[in-house]
Every structure is written in C-alpha cells, then in structure tokens.
Image (tube, rainbow, N blue to C red):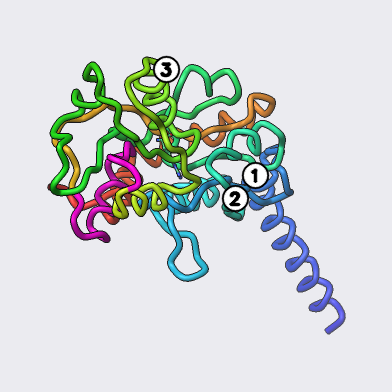
Amino acid sequence: MKKFFAILMAAVLVMTMAACAGEGSNNGSGLNTVEKGVLVMATNAEFPPYEYREGETIVGIDAEIAEAIAKKLGLTLRIEDMEFDSIISAVKGGKADVGLAGMTVTDERLEEVNFSASYATGVQVVIVTEDSKITSVDDLFAEGANHTIGVQLSTTGDIYTTGDIEDAGLGTIERYNKGADAVMALKSGKIDCVVIDNEPAKAFVAANEGLKILETEYITEDYAIAMPKSNTALAEAVDKALQELIADGTVQKIIDKYISAE
Ligand code: ARG
C-alpha cells in the first residue's frame, strides 16, 4: 500500500511538473508585461463597433482581437478604458502593454510607439444633417467656407482638419472627448459637421435621426496595435500572434461579426 502511494505521488508530481512546463512555455515565454500574466490593453470605449460598452463590459472588434492575442500568448486580458488622448502615453509610459482603439498609424505616433501590422482599414468621413448645405468633402476646403467642424480630440479627424481647415483659415474645429458628443452637438445645431471614422459614423447615424454620411471620403487609413518601443520582445510576440490570427481568418471572422458587408 505504501509503495502504491509512493508511485501515485511520483506520478502526480511528474504530471504537475509537465503542466507547469506547458504553462511556462506560454505564460512565461519570457514576456515582460505591465502585470505578470496579464496583457493590459488601453482603449477608449467610445468607438463602436471597435470598442464600446455593453452594460459594464467593453466589447467590440478590438476587444475580441486582443482577447485572441492574449490567449495565444497565455496571458489574461485586462482592458483599461481611458480618454483617446491618453492611450499613447499609457503605452509609452508603461501603464499598458498594448493600445487597441481603431488607432491609425501616423508618422507622429510612430515616433512615440511601435505599431503592429495593420488589421483593418478606416476611412475618415463627414457626418452632416440631412438638410445640410455641405454636400461633399471639398465644400469644407472651399475659399471662405468657414464651417465649424466637430471631431474627437487628438484623433486623426482632429489632426487632419486642424491642418487642412483651421490652420488654413478655412474654418473652426470643435474638439470633443467623445465622438458621440460631437454628434450631439451636430444634432443640436452647434456645429456644421463631424469628421470621424466610417464605422463609428455609421453607428452614430443609425442611432440618431436626421443625420447622414457624405458619399465622398476624406482619407483612408490603417488601424494597428500600438506597443511600447522599449519592449521589443512583447511587440514581436503580439505582432506574430496578430499575423497568425489574420492568416487563419480569425480577425476577419471577428470583423464580420460586428460589420455586415454591404
Ligand atoms: N482612427 C482614428 C485615430 O486613430 C480615431 C480612433 C478613435 N478611437 C477610439 N477608440 N476613440 O485617430
């Protein structure tokens, strides 16, 4: 009986060690994260269908992609919701491991963070009221146009319109913390239009009567994951995981779940 127990204990020990080794090759693949075993994602959950709240939970394309990446790396995902304007500094300052926020790759941001491969395309579009005199994007750049344009603070919509329109003396930019607040201002007649990414634009127009999206587009851009420049091992692991999820169709499946093809 004693012998049997000894053998049993030995077997349990070997099995436990094997399990630990298995875990170690995932979780402990040397990945240094803000918190051990956790992938901290910084986002701004005001951007349907990429990230938004369903009750208390943050859902959306980015949340699901991050979840799939974390799983591949043997990490648990934790999402931190913050102002869009704070995401880059959170990633840069060691408060978050990744930033997923329908974030466009720009040269300025590349000076602050690394970006993964691109996983989606975004288009800056213009939302107007149905009876608006603005009928095409070009109307915003017309001599003497002088429109008041709403954007979400620090987004590419802000950056482009500031350069193309405000700095050129062709109009005024109103910057809001949330895209939805800009849309509310448009509805109540405080501003003339909103420049924002196409997918949230569709969601906001669907949720608010009397608004439409202009057919002409402002600019097309690439969304990618922001990562700290200081942690190249993590950046490489996240990028590799993402590329695999793109290659095996997982990313497309997640996108299709939230965006119906027209
Ligand atoms: N694509 C735009 C940018 O990178 C807007 C992203 C806004 N994202 C958000 N989660 N609010 O600037």
Residue 61 visible in the snapshot: no
- Measured from the top left, where is residue 233 in percent x and y? 64, 29
Which residue: 69% across, 25% down?
230
Q: Is residue 204 magenta?
A: yes
Disc 2: CA contacts within 10 A as few (<14), some (14-19) or many (>=20): many
Q: Is residue 2 left or right of residue 94?
A: right
Which residue: 43% across, 52% down?
51
Q: Which residue lies under the disc numbered 2?
A: 74
Front residue of this view, candidates 24 and 245: 245
CB of residue at label 1: within 8 Å of ligand 1? Answer: no
Look at label 1 and name its amino acid.
Ser
**Label 1: element kind:** helix
Q: Which residue lies under the disc numbered 3?
A: 167
- Marks 2/1 in contact by CB < 8 Å: the verdict is yes
- Marks 1/3 in contact by CB < 8 Å: the verdict is no
Which residue: 47% across, 44% down?
176
Q: Earlier in the sequence, mark 1 or mark 3?
A: 1
> Magenta residues, as a range?
190-211
